[in-house]
Image (cartoon, rainbow, N blue to C red):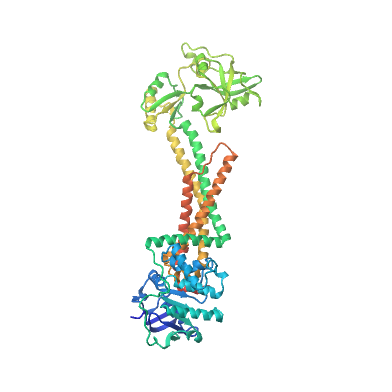
């Protein structure tokens, strides 16, 4: 059986509605070890025949058998395997990759055979040294002469064994001396057992072959046949054993490593375009990460402050707007408060005693709010002492007439820069609170202003949100408040603190039921702080998602830019795609190459974006102390994943377009 058998092979092209037959019923056999020249003028079909012989193109009809395999029925990946294992190509224009040196260009076919870096580099070095390029291993194509580039292409053709060498006008771009050297090398390769198929229009070049096939208008018009006495070699060429192909896993490892390295080289070769493409991704990632970090910090700060104030708390107050006209709501009596303390899920009940009054210091006076404070008031109201001290146990026990001001009341009563500590403030409650005179044994309401010594000043902790009023506030010992200002045992409002062992809404329903039974009607109001806090959390979560979504638009724009750049890259590197396919790259290899390139571009842009967001966070933290913005490891992981995802999504279309190219069409483009 012949090495190559063609039976009635035809190849037609469609130019609009016109059918152009490039080959028309070609039948021929080529034995292993032959040196064949295919001649013909331009348009005779010789290049099309070489493309079919080299599995770069499929015939429109007919049978094409290589060593027993009908190549006309094989798919793209099977044809790529045949090219990788059986063929070596020598092109008129060399078709070397400009960003690779001589050794890397020669070793390219072994990449798609899954051969490791060391073995393929050693074999490439040995082949180049045998071809006289031992001192040019690390020179790129633009640093080599035409003859030297053609010898690199010979080394590439022999890399995987090169049982069949297809040479398309190999001397066309060479001077006479280099052309003669090329023909000598081809004759030497044929003597070593390689099957040489030479395509040329020059009769002098064809004369070096032992068999000449002449084409005209897509038909064989002359063929002197296999030379008499030709004996096919009994084994593969022995000039240098081909490298051993790696297994599937090994090929995958080599492909990934090569794809990443090639991606970095391609991006490095177009620095400005790469930088502009990365800029879009960087801005998108930086926007998303920064806004997420900022909203997370703001949410954490607000929710922490708000949680300490309203979470786990149900305020209850006297009065209800739904009461009929003229109805007077009842205050809350001590035994009612005690009954609530016994409810399941109630941790404690805190009474709120406060009243509005007039305070005066020297010539300054102001309407303020007096609050009966206890040891837990500072923590409950998120306050801190900024001057002096807070109320102590002795103040509570002796009912001392001391007071702690907040910043509003201090500014209202004292001059700017004046220290209030140790000074007297006179408070005048004015009209007695309702029902105070009716309390048996209660002291009469004060008729004159009472002196209080200022012992401290408080302010919201860390600038956080806290309970407050549009009025300034005075904090008195709760014992003094009850003795001097309001001796009623009843209260108008209180807070129920929850232990959260029972759902807050259930506790609230129990409170309403109990007080309604005691008062005979719902003349009071309640508010579920825990429930409202959860609603607030859901709102802040939605707002954070909205802000992140707005920022993600810039990431989407960056992704579209990457896709556009990769589509341009495919069109610019069509010839490179054809070269890789010619030396054995599968469609999946090409797809992987461009997909990894897009991912690498986006990941690098993502890393720059993360760095920008980190710098922005440091700038925000340095500019203020109230909000601590932190770029978490989770955010970094998400940013990395998102940038990779953008590369995968927006790199898929360019990668598929590159993989769908026909090898022969890709090689024909410049």
Query: Residue 500, image x and y in percent?
Result: 39, 31
Query: Residue 574, image x and y in percent?
Result: 50, 69
How many marks do you count on the picture? 0
- The front one of 120 and 87 is 120
- The front one of 90 and 428 is 90
- The front one of 22 and 2 is 2
Please give the name of the residue rendered at 55% of the width and 14% of the height, measured from the top-left corner. 446
Observer able to see residue 656: no
Vertical side of 104 occupied by 390: above or below: above
Name the residue at the top extreme: 441
Vertical side of 300 occupied by 377: above or below: above
- The front one of 131 and 285 is 131
Q: Quadrant of the N terminus?
A: bottom left
Observer able to see residue 11: yes
**Quarter of the view holding residue 623:** top right
Query: Residue 275, image x and y in percent?
Result: 56, 57
Query: Residue 67, image x and y in percent?
Result: 35, 76
Vertical side of 542 occupied by 240: above or below: below
Please give the name of the residue rendered at 61% of the width and 25% of the height, measured from the top-left corner. 410
Please give the name of the residue rendered at 55% of the width and 62% of the height, measured from the top-left corner. 269
């Amino acid at each position: 059986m012949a090495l190559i058998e063609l039976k009635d092979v035809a190849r037609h092209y469609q130019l609009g509605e016109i059918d152009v037959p490039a080959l028309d019923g070609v039948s021929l056999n080529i034995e292993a070890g032959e040196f064949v020249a295919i001649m013909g003028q331009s348009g005779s079909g010789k290049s099309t025949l070489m493309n079919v012989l080299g599995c770069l193109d499929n015939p429109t009809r007919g049978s094409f058998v290589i060593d027993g395999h009908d190549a006309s029925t094989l798919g793209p990946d099977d044809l790529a395997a045949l090219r990788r294992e059986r063929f070596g190509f020598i092109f008129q224009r060399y078709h070397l990759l400009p960003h690779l040196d001589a050794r890397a260009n020669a070793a390219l076919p072994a990449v798609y055979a899954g051969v490791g870096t060391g073995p393929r580099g050693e074999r490439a070095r040995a082949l180049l040294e045998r071809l006289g390029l031992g001192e040019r291993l690390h020179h790129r194509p633009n640093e080599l002469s035409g003859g030297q580039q053609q010898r690199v292409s010979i080394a590439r053709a022999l890399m995987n064994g090169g049982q069949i060498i297809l040479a398309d006008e190999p001397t066309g771009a060479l001077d006479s001396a280099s052309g003669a050297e090329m023909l000598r090398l081809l004759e030497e390769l044929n003597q070593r057992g390689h099957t040489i198929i030479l395509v040329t229009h020059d009769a002098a070049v064809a004369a070096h072959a032992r068999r000449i096939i002449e084409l005209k208008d897509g038909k064989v018009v002359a063929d002197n046949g296999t030379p008499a006495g030709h004996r096919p070699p009994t084994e593969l060429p022995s000039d240098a054993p081909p490298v051993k192909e790696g297994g599937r896993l090994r090929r995958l490892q080599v492909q990934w490593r090569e794809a990443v390295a090639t991606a970095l080289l391609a991006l490095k070769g177009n620095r400005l375009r790469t930088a502009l493409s990365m800029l879009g991704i960087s801005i998108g990632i930086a926007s998303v990460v920064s806004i997420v970090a900022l909203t997370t910090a703001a949410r954490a700060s607000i929710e922490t402050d708000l949680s300490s104030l309203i979470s786990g708390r149900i305020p209850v107050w006297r009065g209800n707007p739904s009461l009929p006209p003229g109805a007077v709501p009842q205050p809350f009596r001590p035994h009612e408060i005690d009954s609530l303390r016994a409810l399941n899920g109630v941790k404690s009940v805190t009474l709120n005693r406060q009243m509005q009054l007039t305070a005066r210091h020297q010539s300054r006076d102001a309407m303020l709010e007096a609050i009966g404070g206890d040891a837990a008031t500072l923590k409950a109201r998120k306050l801190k002492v900024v001057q002096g001290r807070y109320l102590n146990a002795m103040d509570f026990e002796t009912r001392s007439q001391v007071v702690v001001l907040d910043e509003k009341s201090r500014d209202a009563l004292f001059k700017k820069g004046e220290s209030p500590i140790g000074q007297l403030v006179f408070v005048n409650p004015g009209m007695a609170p309702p029902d105070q005179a009716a309390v048996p044994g209660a002291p009469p309401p004060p008729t004159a202003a009472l002196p209080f010594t200022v012992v401290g000043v408080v302010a919201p902790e860390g600038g956080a949100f806290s309970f407050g009023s549009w009025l300034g506030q005075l904090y008195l010992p709760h014992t003094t408040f009850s003795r001097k200002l309001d001796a009623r045992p009843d209260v108008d409002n209180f807070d129920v603190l929850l232990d959260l062992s029972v759902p807050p809404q259930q506790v609230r329903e129990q409170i309403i039921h109990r007080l309604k039974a005691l008062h005979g009607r719902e003349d009071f109001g309640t508010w579920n702080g825990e429930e409202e806090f959860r609603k607030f959390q859901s709102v802040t979560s939605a707002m954070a998602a909205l802000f992140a979504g707005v920022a993600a638009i810039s990431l989407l724009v960056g992704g579209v830019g990457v896709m556009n750049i990769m589509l341009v890259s495919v069109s610019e590197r069509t010839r490179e795609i054809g070269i890789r396919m010619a030396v054995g790259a599968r469609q999946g290899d090409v797809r992987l190459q461009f997909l990894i390139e897009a991912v690498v571009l986006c990941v690098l842009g993502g890393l720059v974006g993360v760095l920008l967001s980190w710098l922005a966070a440091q700038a925000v933290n340095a500019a203020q102390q109230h909000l601590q913005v932190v770029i978490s490891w989770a955010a970094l992981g998400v940013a990395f994943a998102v940038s990779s995802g953008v590369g995968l999504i927006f790199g898929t279309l360019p990668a598929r377009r590159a993989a769908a190219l026909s090898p022969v069409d890709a090689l024909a483009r410049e």
